[in-house]
Amino acid sequence: MIRIGLVDFDTSHVIAFTERLNHINVPASEYVAGARVVAGCPGDSLMMPERIPPYAKQLANYGIRLVSKPEELLGDIDAVMIESQQGARHLMRSKPFLEAGLPTFVDKPFAETVAQADAMIRLAARCHAPLMSCSALRYAPEVIDAVQKTRELGPIIGADVWTTATLHPGNPGLLHYGIHGVEMLYTLLGAGCARVRCTSTADADLVVGSWRDGRNGTVRGIRKGAPGFGFVAHYEKGRYTASVEGSAYYREMLRTIVGMFTTKRPPYDVRVSREIIAFISAARRSAASGGGPRSL
């Protein structure tokens, strides 16, 4: 049984993940086998510090051992999940665990900047530490179904995604919530975006990405009107439209994470996560310049 430690408790993910991994307060259909959360560091937060005390209390009631410093988890865990909401904290928080060679999951956003993402990737490679980062929306059943439809409809030649895109200064631009939509786009189209154009208003973002192989993908970030997540995937022989419903993506993502913790093999190249940060950074630069194209 893989022993997992959690770092930073300013997100509801620490509760949602623990309940599924430790089989607490969720239906049996949501259980994830092979690993358990055994300890955690509540930490602090520049974004939502008010969440930490109630989440720490709830996890303590679940039997999770709490420590005051992340480094105190070393020796008692086999893998770690960095759960800070703020991407800028992830390099600092992951560093002791990557240096120890532990399999490390970094919740979205992977980092705030490409430079921070590169530093984590280099450290993981030097210390032979498996490293993974993603949004749970990558594993939404509807998105997985769309990828599998290539067997009957041929390659995906483009995709249009919509996503809730709530803003927070702690995670600039699409990093905070719009990253869910970018993650879906990358699951559908794969890596290889060359340039981005973004028009941004108080109510919405419209991002157009141009891939090096000639494909295009769009992300509409929603801040006014009905929220939610969904997409249209365009294939050589048709199209598929879906809204993402429910929360099965947590279960499916956790199964993949546990697989990585067990085999020590990430499910895909972490440089895809780096490119997602580059995409969002380019979109922010484009919006600031009035919507002109910006390269990744």
Image (spheres, rainbow, N blue to C red):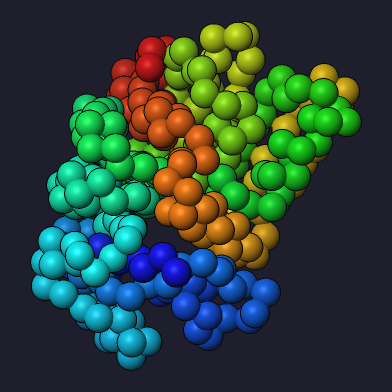
Q: x, y (%) of residue 238?
A: 86, 27
Q: Quadrant of the C terminus?
A: top left
The residue located at (37%, 30%) in the rendering is 274
The residue located at (50%, 84%) in the rendering is 24
Decide if residue 167 is in sight here: no
Task: Tell me: 134 left or right of 97.
Answer: right
- Compared to residue 254, the image places residue 15 above or below, namely below
Q: Nearer the viewer, residue 221 or 21?
A: 21
Q: Nearer the viewer, residue 5 or 153?
A: 5
Q: Nearer the viewer, residue 142 or 270?
A: 270
Q: Residue furthest bottom?
A: 61
Q: x, y (%) of residue 276?
A: 42, 31
State the image quarter where residue 272 is shown: top left
Q: x, y (%) of residue 261?
A: 43, 54
State the image quarter where residue 88 is shown: top left
- Compared to residue 2, the image places residue 218 above or below, namely above
The residue located at (67%, 74%) in the rendering is 29
Q: Quadrant of the N terminus?
A: bottom left
Q: x, y (%) of residue 216?
A: 61, 18
